[in-house]
């Protein structure tokens, strides 16, 4: 049995500097063996600074490297499917950044390719594994707020300031849509983890004044398989930044922020119980550890292609009116 997974990164950009690259080196049984970036000088610089043995300027070279056991795709969504299909064809497990693809159709193609090749597919919805949110799951599993009734999310930010007049996150050809797909996906996937799959969703998306083309405001309602109701509003062109989700039950509620560094709060008849649980220095490390453990046959990964595609389906439903206009 293997005792170590040797990873290769396609796209060693900003997200890999702290969040994930060092995590691949620090997780038990995991090692970062090679990195790739189209700019060879930047790939070489990354390899030097992070102590990575090999670097490439082309994805095929990294994917076919016999010393790479699994591939982490850290590029924007527009190339997720392309590189996933190539890695699957090479028979290598895939860990891809979120959102999983530009849309649900791409996600289905990615899943099918990995299933046909007999390789696992994982997605970087790392909040599922963070201790702060595992605490919420612990409260829910213990019925701390009784029978669940509904969940509501309100997320707003100030208008985006595009770097040099352009930001790929609001270029649908690269990101798939607006900031909702990049940011809202984290909350929706976390709710899938905490409350179970969403089986019915509908929404409305609009651009209410942003300088970019895709939607800047999305509202929706959904129902979970368990019967729990949910509502959400995401506005990326508001007067301030705010991010709060509340899960309401028959005996109390749980409040948390997906992105802000705040305590999670349990409210019951006994009063408030805030818990501040710091995130790890390399925020993807707990999820990467669970993936590595599964690949080594000693655990279960907390975010897979099968769980992530559910979030893509919900997002597609919530913005369907805008994309279909």
Image (spheres, helix red, strand yellow):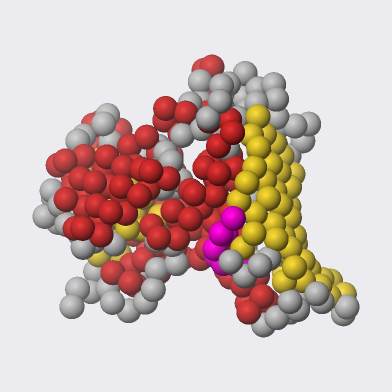
Query: Horizontal and vertical percent for residue 247?
Result: 73, 64
Q: Residue at x 51, y 52 (%)?
A: 311
Query: Horizontal and vertical percent for residue 2?
Result: 19, 73
- Horizontal arrangement in the rendering, residue 240 relative to residue 123 (left or right): right
On the image, which quarter does residue 301 sit in? bottom left
Query: Horizontal and vertical percent for residue 125?
Result: 48, 55
Return the residue nearer the eye: 187 or 10: 187
- Horizontal arrangement in the rendering, residue 299 relative to residue 206 (left or right): left
Q: Which residues are magenta?
A: 193-200
Query: Horizontal and vertical percent for residue 49?
Result: 33, 44
Return the residue nearer the eye: 152 or 46: 152
Return the residue nearer the eye: 170 or 324: 324
- Horizontal arrangement in the rendering, residue 189 relative to residue 272 (left or right): left
Q: Residue at x 26, y 43 (%)?
A: 83
Return the residue nearer the eye: 40 or 204: 204
Find out whether residue 196 is within the magenta segment.
yes
Above or below, 31 against 3 in this view is above
């Amino acid at each position: 049995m293997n005792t170590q997974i040797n990873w290769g990164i396609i796209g060693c950009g900003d997200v890999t500097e702290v969040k994930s690259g060092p995590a691949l080196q620090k997780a038990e049984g995991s090692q970062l063996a090679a990195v790739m970036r189209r700019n060879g000088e930047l790939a070489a610089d990354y390899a030097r600074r992070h102590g990575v043995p090999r670097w490439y300027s082309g994805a095929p070279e990294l994917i076919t490297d016999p010393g790479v056991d699994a591939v982490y795709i850290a590029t924007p969504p527009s190339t997720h499917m392309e590189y996933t299909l190539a890695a699957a064809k090479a028979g290598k497990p895939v860990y891809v950044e979120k959102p999983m693809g530009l849309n649900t159709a791409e996600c289905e193609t990615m899943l099918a390719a990995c299933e046909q090749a007999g390789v696992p597919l994982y997605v970087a919805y790392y909040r599922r594994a963070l201790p702060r949110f595992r605490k919420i799951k612990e409260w829910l599993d213990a019925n701390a707020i009784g029978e669940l009734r509904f969940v509501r999310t309100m997320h707003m930010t100030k208008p985006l300031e595009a770097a040099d007049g352009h930001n790929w996150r609001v270029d649908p050809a690269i990101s798939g849509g607006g900031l909702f797909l990049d940011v809202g996906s984290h909350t929706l996937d976390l709710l899938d983890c905490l409350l179970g799959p969403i089986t019915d969703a509908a929404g409305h998306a609009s651009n209410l004044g942003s300088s970019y083309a895709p939607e800047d405001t999305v509202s929706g309602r959904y129902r979970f398989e368990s019967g729990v109701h949910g509502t959400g509003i995401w506005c990326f062109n508001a007067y301030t930044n705010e991010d709060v989700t509340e899960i309401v039950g028959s005996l109390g509620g749980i409040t948390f922020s997906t992105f802000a560094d705040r305590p999670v709060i349990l409210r019951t008849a006994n009063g408030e119980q805030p818990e501040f649980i710091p995130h790890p220095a390399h925020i993807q490390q707990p999820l990467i550890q669970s993936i590595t453990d599964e690949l080594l046959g000693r655990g279960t990964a907390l975010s897979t292609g099968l769980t992530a595609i559910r979030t893509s389906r919900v997002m597609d439903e919530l913005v369907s009116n805008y994309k279909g206009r």
